[in-house]
Amino acid sequence: MTIRDRYAPSPTGLQHIGGIRTALFNYLFARSKGGRFILRLEDTDRTRYDEVFVKNLYDTFSWLGIHWDEGPDVGGSSAPYIQSERFGLYKKYALELVEKGRAYYCFCSAERLDKIRAEREAAHSSESGYDRYCRDIPPAEAAARALAGEAYTIRLKIPLGETTKFRDQLLGDIEWKNDDVSPDPVLLKSDGFPTYHLANIVDDHLMEITHVLRAQEWLSSTPMHVILYKAFGWEHPVFCHLPMVMGQDGKKLSKRHGATSIDEFRRHGYLPEALLNYVALLGASYEEGREIYTPEELAERFSLDKLNKAPAIFDYKKLEWYNGQYIRMKSDEELAALALPYSIAAGLFGEAGTEPGAEQRSKFIAAMPLIKERLVFLHEAAEKLRYLFGEPAIPAAEEFIPKKADLAQAIRLLKLGRELVKPLAESNDEEAEAIIKAAAEKADVKLGDLLMPLRVAITGSRVSPPLFGSLRILGTERALARVDAALSGLGAT
Ligand code: GLU
């Protein structure tokens, strides 16, 4: 049997952490079993539908590098994969259930339903849902009324007094009293469109879905889905409801905790690899003590029995750590290409939006080793490298003065440093290290004290990317000009 699973989002919102976790687990599960991963758009809710969300879905997954084997954009043997393009077929299935006595026509108007709701509210009744008013209309009479043009919906006839049982791959055996299942939910709306439940089940069946891996909030719908499968006489797929994703406070992850939409993470300078790697660990464990995995390695290791029952806690700090790790794995060219758009937007090469010239571009690439180890987000590159692309303001005099020293000493150290600019700019790190050490010894000053005023003059700050590399990129001439400007700022003669 070929494993077939699917991600079935409703395009009523932006893709968020929970959604991509569901998609990723389905993707990994299909990969791990040599199966097929399918994308199906469940756009039955036309009031909340927006084209923007469909575009966001495609953009998100192409950025993440997750590809489906079958879907609206790639086709497949079960096409079409968009429910609005399948609307014609659901009615037939709803009528089939009416025919079998497992569903019935309901002629209740929206006003009637509103009225019962209001009455119950007024009476503080705990009852909710449909009152099964049309359940016992004799089928022939109901069919005649429908045929005569009376508006109707079709409702599932939940068999009362029974218990529905199914096995969840993660949660084990689940039992649900039918009397506690939503009372006779609508399958087909009065406009002839299916509800989510009908379309979801019919499509999972027609698309030969073998496994449904989905968020735990769907668990309460599953008994009703199982009843539907039975009503059709179909076997239901294996269900596996994935562990919840919570914030650090143990509440369901939401905007209150921070970014949740993938767009936000992307804008913020996260790498797709980092996000994928971290999300793959939300509710699953692979190898003890190992944290970094490529998608292929995850697919090799993924299995449903590695899922955790306990909710997964989303840790933003951990995700940042992953991002840093993946940044370090990039070559200088790759990292430059990734960080460039953020740096252009931040105005590193002129006004915001200015593209770099050829020289600036190669300087940008050459500067990557200076920041690679320190970057957590791609957008930080611009701030960290600004001193290389424009002249930094000369800091106040006290910034140049090492601990326990005075201005005269700082000037002396900077003058000493000035002598070293050319040899340092022309050396590699190792040579530069030796040069500065020897100079400090000769002048009988601390190494750090010799470096500090020079660093401030060159980078405009006491804390900066590595000085030697900065000197090499700036070149002797520009570096000397900065030292001279600093010296004159300090009043040195
Ligand atoms: N359309 C549902 C959603 O938005 C699908 C639930 C399921 O996977 O069955 O999540």
Image (cartoon, helix red, strand yellow):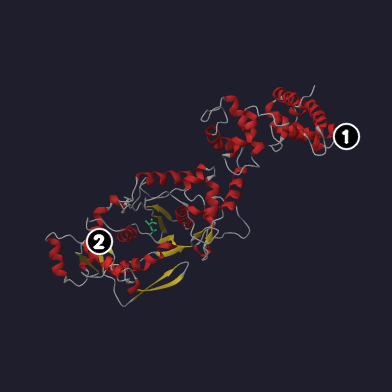
Examine the rendered structure and indicate whether residue 129 appears above or below residue 64.
Answer: below
Image point (53%, 35%), residue name: 341
Q: Is 31 in front, or is 482?
A: 482
Residue labelled with disc 1? 444
Q: Position of residue 409 (x, y in %)?
A: 83, 31
Mark 1–mark 2 Cα distance, whole angstroms, equals: 91 Å
Q: Position of residue 44 (x, y in %)?
A: 31, 54
Q: Is 153 in front, or is 334?
A: 153
Residue labelled with disc 2? 93
Q: Is 263 in front, or is 144?
A: 263
Categorize mark 1 by other alpha carbons within 10 Å: few (<14), some (14-19), many (20+): few
Amino acid type at circle 2 is Tyr
Please tell me in which quadrant of the rendered image residue 453 appears: top right
Q: Secondary structure at mark 1?
A: loop
Q: Position of residue 46 (x, y in %)?
A: 30, 51
Examine the rendered structure and indicate whether residue 290 appears above or below residue 484.
Answer: below
